[in-house]
Amino acid sequence: MKTFAELGFPGRLIAVEGLDGSGKTTQIYLLKRWLETRGLKVYFSEWNSSELVKSATSRAKKLQLLTPTTFSLIHATDFADRYERHLLPLLRAGFLVLCDRYIFTAFARDVVRGCPAEWVRGIYSFAALPDVTFFFKADLEVSLRRILDTRPVLKFYEAGMDLGLSPDPQESFRLFQGRLLQQYLDMADEFKFEVIDANQPVEVQQAVVRRIVSRRIKLAQFKCNRPRPVAVAHGAVGKTEPVTQQVE
Amino acid sequence: MKSKIKSSSISRALPPRRFYGHGIPGVNLDDLVGTLIVIEGADGSGRSTQITKLVDWLESHGYATTRVGLKGSNLVGAELAKAQQGNILSRTTLALFYATDFADQLENTIMPALRAGFIVLADRYIYTLMARDMVRGMDEAWLKNLYGIALVPDAVFYLNVAPEELVQRALFKNAALDYWESGMDIGLSRDMFDSFLKYQAAMQRAFRRLQTIYGFAVIDGNRPVETINRELRQQISAVLRGRVRPRPTWRKSR
């Protein structure tokens, strides 16, 4: 697998990964603001998938129809849809694309559900690797508290209830997140994650993120020559919305 | 119609059940005691006619059967049908959407029926899906990995019919050609008739390529229905005679 830069794309993709409650969504939002204020061609991918795929996915989850295999495949379908319709054209057009979660979320999640790692990776092999991947590494307890304190009602798949780890959703969520964390840590070297200490203050983390981005990407190339369109509300990405919305 | 299914006392053991690749996690293959028979072929190759006759024949001999086709899953069947109304999904997305449908039916229809000892007659299987994707330029190794979830059937028959004959049958039946069966989405020709012939020829080449990998039986589908059915019954009888699967040898500990 190669990065977009290695494949000769004019655009660059920056992905953030981490557990729910690791603060990654806040960090990518701040990164986006910074790139925008510097007048760069930046796009924050909101993962809007097409109606068809979305309708199948949400019904399947509501009715709890998914097995590990179909869970993996339906999310791969969703990802492929966004990738081909949305990400590829932006990267061809030379945008800096920011992704809140990328293929590593699927790698971690599907393997924890029991799918063979090589199978999952093979399926996602149509996607190029990010040019920079940040992994926000918070203590498990910190992430858990941030989620469990704000939103006590966990969805079935979000809590990993289908794994049968515990009949209690909160306990199941804890065990599930612990296993996901392990998967992420196992991938960190292989995929050259920039590991950020997510126990530090937000602005300290953000300074590190910005430094790494400006070191690894030639930002001057992404200067936007035309006036920016009037900003569309992207939904405040602060802590009013629970960050778990991207998970399942 | 009266060919006998001989129940031989000496049972030729079929090879043990297996998946093509990584398979479905958590499945005990020894539980799948039924028989999986796949009929492949283009639209108009006579698949459903043959399957209907086979169901009659098998049921008259006391075998329980289940029919399964593509796009039939609870999970995404409805959305797939809609996706076909307008050409809106790109090729990787569509390939994965079909794979999701297949996986759902494999886990929720095919495997439960096999556990119950049924004969499952599959009206198309992964080969059609793979051939369609190959014709659209998807990577063969990628498809092989994806469909490594599939069970290896006990028998696969590919009804091979010449594109020129298929086009006659399709027009005879519907007086029109289907958008997808003509491969109109890939732009082989703006002329639908022309596109149909080119697309079906490309599908045949893809099937020939898959035949070298998966080794299914190629049946000449240009012959009369009864002749083909007799050949299928003969081959399926042979499969059923050898149906007793080897059990894992049970040894007393010590």
Image (tube, coloured by chain):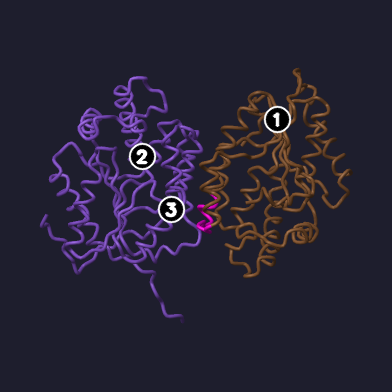
Chain colours: A brown, B purple
Q: Marks 3 and 2, how far apart in space?
A: 28 Å
- The magenta-colored residue range is A63-72
Residue A73 picture location, percent across and down? 52, 48
Q: Is residue B189 magenta?
A: no
In front: label 3 or label 2: 3
Label 2 sits on residue:
B210
The kind of residue tagged 1 is Arg
Which quarter shows the N terminus of chain A?
top right
Q: Earlier in the sequence, mark 3 or mark 2?
A: 3
Residue shown at 74% from the left, 52% from the top: A242
Residue at disc 1, secondary structure: strand
Label 3 sits on residue:
B74
Q: Where is A107 relative to A230, above or below?
A: below
Label 1 sits on residue:
A12
Residue at disc 2, secondary structure: helix
Q: Marks 1 and 3, how far apart in space?
A: 39 Å
Q: State how many labels appear.
A: 3
The kind of residue tagged 2 is Leu
Residue at disc 3, secondary structure: loop
Q: Quadrant of residue A82?
A: top right
Whether residues under marks 3 and 2 lie with C-beta atoms below 8 angstroms apart, the answer is: no
Q: Is residue A70 magenta?
A: yes
Horizontally, is B156 left or right of B2 in the view?
right
Q: Chain of mark 1?
A: A
Residue B43 picture location, percent across and down? 28, 38
Q: Marks 2 and 1, how far apart in space?
A: 38 Å
Residue B61 picture location, percent across and down? 17, 63
Residue shown at 79% from the left, 26% from the top: A219
